[in-house]
Amino acid sequence: MPAIEVRQLSKRYGALVALDGVDLSVEGGEFFGLLGPNGAGKTTLISVIAGLTRADAGRVCVMGHDVVSDYRLARSNLGVVPQELVFDPFFTVRETLRFQSGYFGLHRNDAWIDEILANLGLEDKANANMRSLSGGMKRRVLVAQALVHRPPVIVLDEPTAGVDVELRQTLWKFVARLNRDGHTIVLTTHYLEEAEALCGRIAMLKAGRVVALAPTADLLKHHASAYLRLKVAGALPAEVLALSPRESAGTYRFRLAGFDQVESILAPVRTRGLHIEDLAIESPDLEDVFVQIMEGAAA
């Protein structure tokens, strides 16, 4: 039984097609990535899975429970960390987590609350009022709220957006432990290095459609070429710039059709007498794959 099963899911907002026949399954115990540019439909899909939005067509089940007809069990099996910082300013962190526990019928949950607080670095903030916390600390509490009822399926919607390195490391250490313990994790993120390091399988969305769905290793193997990274003192020749390299801080990155293309890039540089400051052949990363797939997918 899949942890999450999505079948022919469609959702429109007027003329805007947010989801266009989305089909995917997330198996139990997976660390699954859901990637796409802004407006691809990721948050709409998560909202339907969480029961916050009603789809126009299609079906979603969480741990075998339909999110519409069997919504109580579907939601009790799911924990969602939203993008937005939503909190009640009248309660402390511990009170917030106790109330969240109560929503799921858990009345003696302090031992697990204490464990969550410790693992998310919130122990010294347990009795602090929510409105007194920094943005990063509020985000930690959102993660704690999603975990407080021990859901088997956890959805993290941009959980590290705009937060410090310490929180990112703390969060991923704890989430990796939960995944090892059998929890299913679904992650959306614009930090593609996170998805590459953490996710065993990835779906990519564009304009409400799934345009790629495969193990991360297969995406890296089959969708990207090697790259030449080059930095020179001076301006690159026009015929080299015509190859449309990606440029950052004076360093150029060329996608290679083959290794014999390296000489065709370097020859004009040498002919002009330009000094090469840095040169490397690099393997593709998930960002390279993402760019290629998005460029190749029809809008």
Image: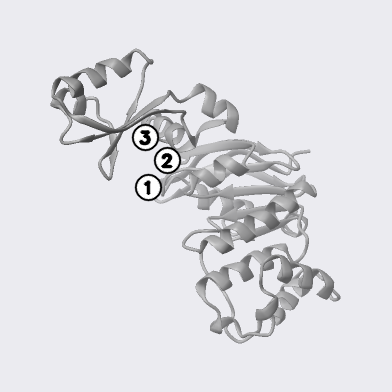
Alpha carbons under labels 2 and 1: distance apart: 13 Å
Q: Earlier in the sequence, mark 1 or mark 3?
A: 1
The one of 171 and 58 positioned closer to us in this rendering: 171
* Chosen colour scheme: one colour
In the picture, measured across the screen, residue 298 lies left or right of residue 86, that is left
Mark number for residue 15?
1
Amino acid at dot 2? Ala
Mark 3 Cα shell of 10 Å, populated few (<14), some (14-19), many (≥20):
few
In the picture, measured across the screen, residue 56 lies left or right of residue 18, that is right
Mark 1 Cα shell of 10 Å, populated few (<14), some (14-19), many (≥20):
few
Q: Quadrant of residue 214?
A: top right
Q: Earlier in the sequence, mark 3 or mark 2?
A: 2
The one of 83 and 233 positioned closer to us in this rendering: 233
Q: Earlier in the sequence, mark 2 or mark 1?
A: 1
Residue hosting label 3 = 299
Q: Residue furthest right?
A: 108
Residue 251, image x and y in percent? Answer: 29, 38
Residue 175, image x and y in percent? Answer: 68, 54
- Label total for image: 3
Q: Residue at x 56, y 40 (%)?
A: 196
Figure quadrant of the C terminus? top left
Residue hosting label 2 = 207
Tell me: residue 22, above or below residue 162: above
The local secondary structure at tag 2 comes to loop
Tell me: residue 253, above or below residue 77: above
Amino acid at dot 3? Ala
Amino acid at dot 1? Ala
Residue 103, image x and y in percent? Answer: 75, 72
The one of 29 and 217 positioned closer to us in this rendering: 217
Residue 70, image x and y in percent? Answer: 75, 53
In the picture, measured across the screen, residue 6 lies left or right of residue 277, that is right
